[in-house]
Image: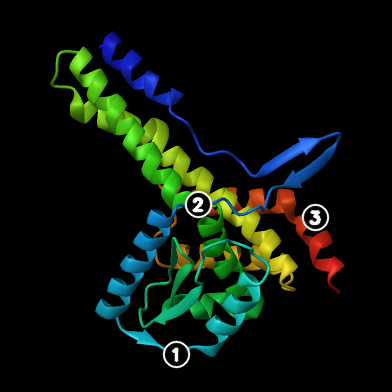
Amino acid sequence: MKKILLSCSALLFVSCATSPVSSSNGQTYIDTTPKPQSAATIASGQRTFEVYKRSKPTTSNSQVTRVGNRIKSVVPLQGAAWEFVTFSNSTPNAFALPGGKVGVHTGILPIAKNDAGLATILAHEIAHVSLNHHENRSKTSAMTGVLGSVLNSALGGGYSQIIQTGSSLAVNLPNSRANEIAADQVGLMYMARAGYDPREAINFWQRFAAYKQSQGSGASSSFFSTHPLDSTRIAKLKEVLPLAIAEYNKGR
């Protein structure tokens, strides 16, 4: 058992997600610089999106297009061919793929409520793309897979499931939650630069939390989740809200 625990602990040395927020000389900064993406990653995202569009019902929505275009104008991501598509789906969700492909379900629009609420959603998804989270996640998964195979072999075999569970709890899930917080915080700056009041992001996430609770899907722990608790992400947004408000006021 000691060998197994030590082996799973070794997975912690795999590169973890980094926060875009830093402090220096009493000042807090958010790095919103888009991260370069490989041509292969961009092409993969574009292919996947085309397949998804062919297999799912879409609908026209001028609000999604208008807000998305306004936010993308403040995100200088090279190689991106931004596209905002609305899918007829009652599940309140949105997603993004490399290459600037963003999908919005109609089910989330009533929770968005207004342009600024929708900007919160779209800026978050755009931030996932600009921070290159998809490629980073693939690299991390590959690294944990290789390390897991080596550890399993070193232990004499038969521990692959334990090691896989350990890598998920120690690396993959924490990375995913950290990426969500990073996308929230960078997205907050993007929406502010695009002229949307960042204070509305707090209101949106509070509405979304209330919706989930009404559906009985509110979580009490994030340990086994890919996403942080709503209370956590709201608190993290409030930490950087003054920076976003200052950014917003620059354009007024």
Q: Is residue 102 above or below residue 143?
A: below
Q: CA distance from mark 3 to mark 1?
A: 35 Å
Identity of the residue furthest to the top in this view: 2
Query: Taking 26 as reference, is 204 left or right?
Result: left
Residue 225: image location, x then y, percent: 40, 46
Q: Is residue 206 above or below residue 227?
A: below
**Near-viewer residue (137 or 198):** 137
Work out whether mark 3 precedes mark 2 in sequence or the reverse, and give the earlier one: 2
Query: Taking 25 as reference, is 227 left or right?
Result: left
Work out whether mark 3 precedes mark 1 in sequence or the reverse, and give the earlier one: 1
Q: Is residue 54 above or below residue 232?
A: below
Name the mark nearer the viewer: 3 or 1: 1
Tell me, for residue 242, which label it has, or none.
3
Q: CA distance from mark 2 to mark 1?
A: 28 Å
Residue highlighted by disc 2: 132
Crowding at dot 2, Cα within 10 Å, few <14 / some 14-19 / many 20+, comes out as many
Query: Callout 1, which amino acid?
Result: Ser
Query: Callout 3, which amino acid?
Result: Pro
Residue at the image point whose x is 56% and y is 86% from the top: 63
Q: Secondary structure at mark 1?
A: loop
Whether residue 48 can be seen here:
yes
**Near-viewer residue (39 or 190):** 39
Q: Secondary structure at mark 2?
A: loop
Query: Taking 94 as reference, is 184 left or right?
Result: right
Q: Are marks 3 and 1 in contact (CB under 8 Å)?
A: no
Crowding at dot 1, Cα within 10 Å, few <14 / some 14-19 / many 20+, comes out as few
Query: Callout 2, which amino acid?
Result: Asn
Tell me, for residue 60, which label it has, or none.
1
Please state, as top left, top right, bottom left or bottom right, where the N terminus lies in the image: top left
Residue at the image point whose x is 46% and y is 40% from the top: 175
Name the mark nearer the viewer: 3 or 2: 2
